[in-house]
Image (tube, rainbow, N blue to C red):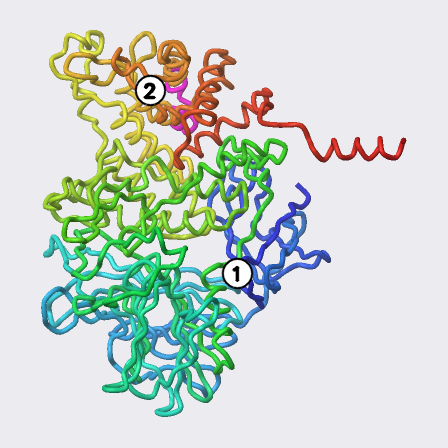
């Protein structure tokens, strides 16, 4: 490598100055050993302010992933061409960003603002100032975070238990604060806030995560959740701008903020309400559109803006200013809220409007559930018009992304075999684009997941069956983003990752501590429950546990929670895997499967547990996983018959192969072999792949659902075998293995259709097909080449 061309596209339509960019960078084994050699060069060859740290290493000790921070200027909707260079020594940028930890506070200076973060007490952000201008009231002792449970009673106040600097470099600094909600001696739930500061910027990014970790409460019914700050504005002459369009793209004009409470409430999809003024002068506007997610308040010489990312996608939300505090109700109390009685006629864009889940009752949190909100706070001078505020809000909503050539991801091998975007095969690329459909879930709980909604006889809409992001669905969106550059896929993939980390993962459970780290089972009702009665939790299963997408997101963004939750999930697999089967499934029983009255053994329960541990170990080789993985490999060795088959129960008497379940076994064995070099695991995986290729297919040559005459039909979920088939073919050159994978690929892409989660599996097989010329059918005649030939003919006339 000399240099790699990279670029940044400004997608929001607003100029950025010294704007932060954080991105994961992949490197091939042996390519980079010194992190200080990473530089980003502009078009003139000059270095941009940038610094990097290591995220993961290859087995040879070279850097596999690095996390880059840089800052740059870019004009609206511009494309900035840059180069990644590792050939010469880099220099750390100089900035004023620094943190000073004291006994009771952490003081941060960015170069534009000075911020005081508390280390104890009810206030999270005690002070924000610029020179002599103070934006908050440092002496106010009211809690910044408040929570109310169902019924009446005083709120539970947020109290800080611990605060520390979690990350720090010259361009970006992160403080992690942990606390709980308390009322007298009673505890409700816990929370974690990460505050991120950027060099020479006047805004703070807060990621507020609440988590139900209170052992005395199986459930919490949350009536209201509020984050607010006491502002130090003048007592008169205040005005507010609201993130709401009144017509077309015209923002609502500023309103007087000296009396009454200002409220902007997103109460359902495409529905929000504005209210302001006091008593008889109070006014209300109901709008059939989504709010923009921000509220800005100012006096004659200062202003504060509060912006929430994914505002309507995570409804209900309410932004408020009561003349004292600027707040965001992360879950507002809508029990007394009344929507507009009569709405005007619908436009053509509103004909298919479907109401989302109503959230006018307390939010029921099972023990162990979490939820994260990302908030931006900007402090500065008053604005001349609301468009200035909206420009900042759009920049926050659409962070700048450093994008690499799509070939780089395959060249480095960080994802294994990975295909670059191929313009010459544009018909296939169009299919892949169409197949990549983000999840449909919207709302504080559903956002990021694929959900099924039901309209009840009383008119209420409720959440029923949820997919809980099974089969690494977010990875498919993230990897298609890396191939195509479609930033929308990154944003939707990020929402899915956060849903998986928060809503689906069990973070705490006093009754079932063995559940911790596991994701709730696919097909749960309303994410967590066994039935629609919602009276029994479903819990996790190793048969439906995946963590690769969490690691993808960690490496692409540096998100520490993604790695932490991935490790929790790997440890869940280590604890919950069915080791007892090793004693039950003797060689004698395995040799006579059809004669057994009971056959409790399921390949996916073992396979995905092994794959989960192997996936984490491949990124972070921690020795505690090896004995657990070895025990499962021992079990699978006994289980596998002389043909290479692993049998599952099929019906009351039959025990046979289930190819889509065996996919987890093959992937797990492949990862264990990679980790240890165990030739036994290699042999078992190759025997399993060979069995499927020769005996696991329908008469048309597509993998069947189950080894049974009544299930001898092509099955789309066998797509998860493709990555192992590609590996097995490269190891053996077996034409039947190649044929099995090729026919499956063609059937899915051309006939059966592809679900979003399947894309990552197609990607793993495509480099092999391309190398062998088996994708050429998707490469039509080149119209440009025909035009060039036609130009020659025209000149020769």
* Residue 365 figure quarter: bottom left
**Which contiguous range is marked in magenta?**
669-683
Q: Quadrant of the C terminus?
A: top right
Does the stretch in magenta take in 331? no
Q: CA distance from mark 2 to mark 1?
A: 45 Å
Tell me, yes or no, whether the two marked residues, 2 and 1, touch with CB atoms within 8 Å. Answer: no
Q: Residue at x 47, y 71 (%)?
A: 250
Tell me the SS state at disc 2: helix
- Residue 732 at what x, y percent from top left? 49, 14
Task: Residue under label 1, please give it.
Answer: 12
Q: What is the crowding at mark 2: few (fewer than 14 residues within 10 Å), some, or many (at least 20)?
A: many
Q: Would you say the magenta stretch is mainly helix, strand or loop?
A: helix
Q: Residue furthest bottom?
A: 236
Above or below residue 279? Residue 420 is above
Which label is found at residue 359? none
The picture places residue 282, in percent across and down from the top left corner, at 27, 83
């Amino acid at each position: 490598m000399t240099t790699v061309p990279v670029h940044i596209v400004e997608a929001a339509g607003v100029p950025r100055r010294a704007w932060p960019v954080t991105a994961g960078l992949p490197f091939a084994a042996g390519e980079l050993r010194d992190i200080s050699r990473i530089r980003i060069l502009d078009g003139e060859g000059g270095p941009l302010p940038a610094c990097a740290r290591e995220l993961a290493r290859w087995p040879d000790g070279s850097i596999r992933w690095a996390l880059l921070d840089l800052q740059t200027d870019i004009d609206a909707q511009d494309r900035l061409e840059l180069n990644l260079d590792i050939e010469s020594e880099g220099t750390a940028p100089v900035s004023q960003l620094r943190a000073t930890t004291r006994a009771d506070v952490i003081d941060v200076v960015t170069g534009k603002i000075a911020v005081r973060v508390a280390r104890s007490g009810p206030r999270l952000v005690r002070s924000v100032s610029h020179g002599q201008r103070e934006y908050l009231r440092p002496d106010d002792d009211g809690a910044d975070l408040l929570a109310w449970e169902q019924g009446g009673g005083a709120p539970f106040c947020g109290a800080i238990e611990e605060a520390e600097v979690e990350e720090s470099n010259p361009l970006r600094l992160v403080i992690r604060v942990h606390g709980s909600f308390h009322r007298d001696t009673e505890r409700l739930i816990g929370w974690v806030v990460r505050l991120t500061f950027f060099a020479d910027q006047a805004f703070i990014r807060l990621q507020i995560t609440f988590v139900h970790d209170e052992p005395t409460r199986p459930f919490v019914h949350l009536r209201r959740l509020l984050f607010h700050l006491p502002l130090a504005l003048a007592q008169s002459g205040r005005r507010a701008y609201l993130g709401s369009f009144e017509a077309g793209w015209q923002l609502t004009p500023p309103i007087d903020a000296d009396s009454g409470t200002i409220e902007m409430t997103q109460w359902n999809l495409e529905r929000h309400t504005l209210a302001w003024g006091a008593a008889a002068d109070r006014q209300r506007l109901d709008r059939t559109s989504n709010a923009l997610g921000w509220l800005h308040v100012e006096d004659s010489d200062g202003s504060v803006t509060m912006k929430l990312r994914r505002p309507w996608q995570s409804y209900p939300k309410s932004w408020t200013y009561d003349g004292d505090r600027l707040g965001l109700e992360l879950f507002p109390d809508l029990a007394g809220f009344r929507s507009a009685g009569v709405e005007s006629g619908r436009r053509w864009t509103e004909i298919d409007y479907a109401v989302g889940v109503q959230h006018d009752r307390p939010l029921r949190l099972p023990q162990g559930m979490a939820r994260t909100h990302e908030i931006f706070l900007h402090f500065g001078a008053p604005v001349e018009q609301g468009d200035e505020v909206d420009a900042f809000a759009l920049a926050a909503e659409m962070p700048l992304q450093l994008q690499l050539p799509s070939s780089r991801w395959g060249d480095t091998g960080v994802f294994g075999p990975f295909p670059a975007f191929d313009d010459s095969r544009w018909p296939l690329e169009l299919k892949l684009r169409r197949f990549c459909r983000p999840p449909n879930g919207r709302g504080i709980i559903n956002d990021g997941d694929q959900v099924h909604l039901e309209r009840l006889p009383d008119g209420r809409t409720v959440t029923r069956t949820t997919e809980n992001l099974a089969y690494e669905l977010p990875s498919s969106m993230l990897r298609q983003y890396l191939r195509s550059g479609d930033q929308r896929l990154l944003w939707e993939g990020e929402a899915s990752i956060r849903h998986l980390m928060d809503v689906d993962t069990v973070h705490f459970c006093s009754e079932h501590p063995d559940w911790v780290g596991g994701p709730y089972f696919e097909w749960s009702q309303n994410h967590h429950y066994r039935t629609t009665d919602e009276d029994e939790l479903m819990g996790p299963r190793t048969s439906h546990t995946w963590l690769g997408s969490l690691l993808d997101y960690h490496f692409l963004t540096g998100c520490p929670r993604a790695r932490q939750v991935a490790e929790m999930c790997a440890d869940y697999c280590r604890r919950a895997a069915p080791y007892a089967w090793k004693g039950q499934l003797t060689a004698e029983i395995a040799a006579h499967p059809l004669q057994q009255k009971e056959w409790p053994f399921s390949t996916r329960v073992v396979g995905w547990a092994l794959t989960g541990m192997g996936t984490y170990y491949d990124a972070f080789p921690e020795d505690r996983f090896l004995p657990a993985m070895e025990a499962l490999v021992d079990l699978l060795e006994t289980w596998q018959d002389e043909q290479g088959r692993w049998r599952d129960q099929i019906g009351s008497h039959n025990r046979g192969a289930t190819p889509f379940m065996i996919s987890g076994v093959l992937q797990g064995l492949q990862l264990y072999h990679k980790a240890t070099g165990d030739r036994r695991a290699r042999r078992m995986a190759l025997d399993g792949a060979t069995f499927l290729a020769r005996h696991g297919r329908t008469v048309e040559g597509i993998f069947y659902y189950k080894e049974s005459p009544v299930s001898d039909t092509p099955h789309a979920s066998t797509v998860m075998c493709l990555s192992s088939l590609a590996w097995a073919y490269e190891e053996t050159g077996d034409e039947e293995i190649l044929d099995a994978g090729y026919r499956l690929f063609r059937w899915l892409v051309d006939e059966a259709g592809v679900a979003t989660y399947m894309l990552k599996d197609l990607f793993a097989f495509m480099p092999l097909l391309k190398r062998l010329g088996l994708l050429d059918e998707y490469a039509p005649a080149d119209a440009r080449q025909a035009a060039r030939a036609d130009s020659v003919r025209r000149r020769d006339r």
